[in-house]
């Protein structure tokens, strides 16, 4: 049977009969998709509420630097610095997201802001932080950048065009994450303007298996890397070389450490940490049940306020372990342009499809213990998510400039 016939058979089996014209390219794409898994995900999306269940849930305890002595903090930092100086530390930037809320044309890391009168892209801001650490610790710091099939070429070109912002090119490695098809509310794959099935990146939790698949874990091992800070591309205040967090992780003999901040209101769009069956878990803001969102203690403080801000530190063993596990998919309801059966391009005004994403924090439960350090919003978290309003370039720029002013 030729591949077009094979593809047609698959579509029939999985009830995707809306796709009529199949050429070689589309057939190749169809043959690569796991429709069995997709069908299961669709059933999940349709049958369950998106809310996470809250059985056996309890709050977590974070280390609050305000409540430990200066000596203890200095000691943690010293331990972290020793590891960095010994060349056992690397960073990974998650830059495979679609940045749909920001609406920037191009990879999110290429988004440019004027900071203290200088124009800088998000990538440049991060690379400059790494350059500062290289000088401070007299090291070469390997930097791994996760892209998606959609934005990889543009990302690499951007680095080439900017001469890697003066960073040693051989210490920057790009690797692509995976993708999943978008499904409409009836479980049919969406078709894009190019006549192919519309794919979207499969969430930042795809990082571990993508690292394994693309030889990144092997590369880290060859370089004797023990710890990797994995951060987002869109937080202007993220500390990629967080020696306090690293020192705490090493001292507490854990394989994963995460930095949190306290949620500014029950409605802030961040995931919160809790424990389920004794293991640390993050409940994303799209899935948090009311009962958890509004729970307060006797002083009126949020019980589940410790928020995940994508500042995660993983031991190489944790990365390796996570890369062999299938993290669960979460379901997001999104708006996405598509081509209908008559070949017309439809621009929906409301959410029209399901997107399936894995989250990096679902790897936390692979370990009995992880270290949690409470950071400070004004020092650690200035995200760029939306075009305007909260978590926008405007709010992030203001926080960043104030931070720089306080720290000169
Ligand atoms: P978000 O989940 O906020 O997604 O990503 P986003 O792509 O920036 O924005 P929206 O939701 O489409 O508006 C948090 C971090 O995880 C990365 C992003 O690039 C960002 O650094 N990410 C997200 C990936 O690397 N891959 C993904 O599939 C999703």
Image (cartoon, rainbow, N blue to C red):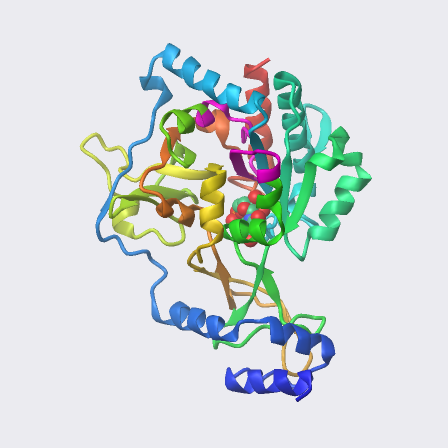
Tell me the magenta residue range. Answer: 221-246
Position of 333 compared to 225: left or right?
A: left
Front residue of 13/321: it is: 321
Say whether residue 313 is visible.
yes
Q: Which residue does the image show at 30% across and 40% down from the upper left? A: 304
Above or below, 50 against 75 in this view is: below
- Residue 134 magenta-drawn? no
Percent position (x, y) of residue 256? 42, 37
Judge from the rendering whether residue 6 lies leftward or rightward of residue 265; answer left or right.
right
- Quarter the N terminus occupies: bottom right
Q: Residue furthest top?
A: 71
Residue 258 percent across, percent down from the top left: 42, 35
Residue 234 in magenta? yes
Residue 153 location in percent, x, y?
74, 52
Q: Quadrant of the C terminus?
A: top right
> Residue visible at 32% across and 56% down?
52
Looking at the image, residue 268 sits to the left or right of residue 279; the answer is right
Regarding residue 111, the answer to whether it shows in the image is no
In the displayed image of the protein, which residue is found farthest to the left? 298
- Write the residue at 21% across / 29% down: 299
Question: Residue at point 47% right, 38% down?
Answer: 314
x and y percentages locating residue 96 in the rendered image: 61, 50
**Left or right of residue 152, residue 254 in this image:** left
Quarter of the image where one finds residue 7: bottom right
Residue 74 placement: quadrant: top left
């Amino acid at each position: 049977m030729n591949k077009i016939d094979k593809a047609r058979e698959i579509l029939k089996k999985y009830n995707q009969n809306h796709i009529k014209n199949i050429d070689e390219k589309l057939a190749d794409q169809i043959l690569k998709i796991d429709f069995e898994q997709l069908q299961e995900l669709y059933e999940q999306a349709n049958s369950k509420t998106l809310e996470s269940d809250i059985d056996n849930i309890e709050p977590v305890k974070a280390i609050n630097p305000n409540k430990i002595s200066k000596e203890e903090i200095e000691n943690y930092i010293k331990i972290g610095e020793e590891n960095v100086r010994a060349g056992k530390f690397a960073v990974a930037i998650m830059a495979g997201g679609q940045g749909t809320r920001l609406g920037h044309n191009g990879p999110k890391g290429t988004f440019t802001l004027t900071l203290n009168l200088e124009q800088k892209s998000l990538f440049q801001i991060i690379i400059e932080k790494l350059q500062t650490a290289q000088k401070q610790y007299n090291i070469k710091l390997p930097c791994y950048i996760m892209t998606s099939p959609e934005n990889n070429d543009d990302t690499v070109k951007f680095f080439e065009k900017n001469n890697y912002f003066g960073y040693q090119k051989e210490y920057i490695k790009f690797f692509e994450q995976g993708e999943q098809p978008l499904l409409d509310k009836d479980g049919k794959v969406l078709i894009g303007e190019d006549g192919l099935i519309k794919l979207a990146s499969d969430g930042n939790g795809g990082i571990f298996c993508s690292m394994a698949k693309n030889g990144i874990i092997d590369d880290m091992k060859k370089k004797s890397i023990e710890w990797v800070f994995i951060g987002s591309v869109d937080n202007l205040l993220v500390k990629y070389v967080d020696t306090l967090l690293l020192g705490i992780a090493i001292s507490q003999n854990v394989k994963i450490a995460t930095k949190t901040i306290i949620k500014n209101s029950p409605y802030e769009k961040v995931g919160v940490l809790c424990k389920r069956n004794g293991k640390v878990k993050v409940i994303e803001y799209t899935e948090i049940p009311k009962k958890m969102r509004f729970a307060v203690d006797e002083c009126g403080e949020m019980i589940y306020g410790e928020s995940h801000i994508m500042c995660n530190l993983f031991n190489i063993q944790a990365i390796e372990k996570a890369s062999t596990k299938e993290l669960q998919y979460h379901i997001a309801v999104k708006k996405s342009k598509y081509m209908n059966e008559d070949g017309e391009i439809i621009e929906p005004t409301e959410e029209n499809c399901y997107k399936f994403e894995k989250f990096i924090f679902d790897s936390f439960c692979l370990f009995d213990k992880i270290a949690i350090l409470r950071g400070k919003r004004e020092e650690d978290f200035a995200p760029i998510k939306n075009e305007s309003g909260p978590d926008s370039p405007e709010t992030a720029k203001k926080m960043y400039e104030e931070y720089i002013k306080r720290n000169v």
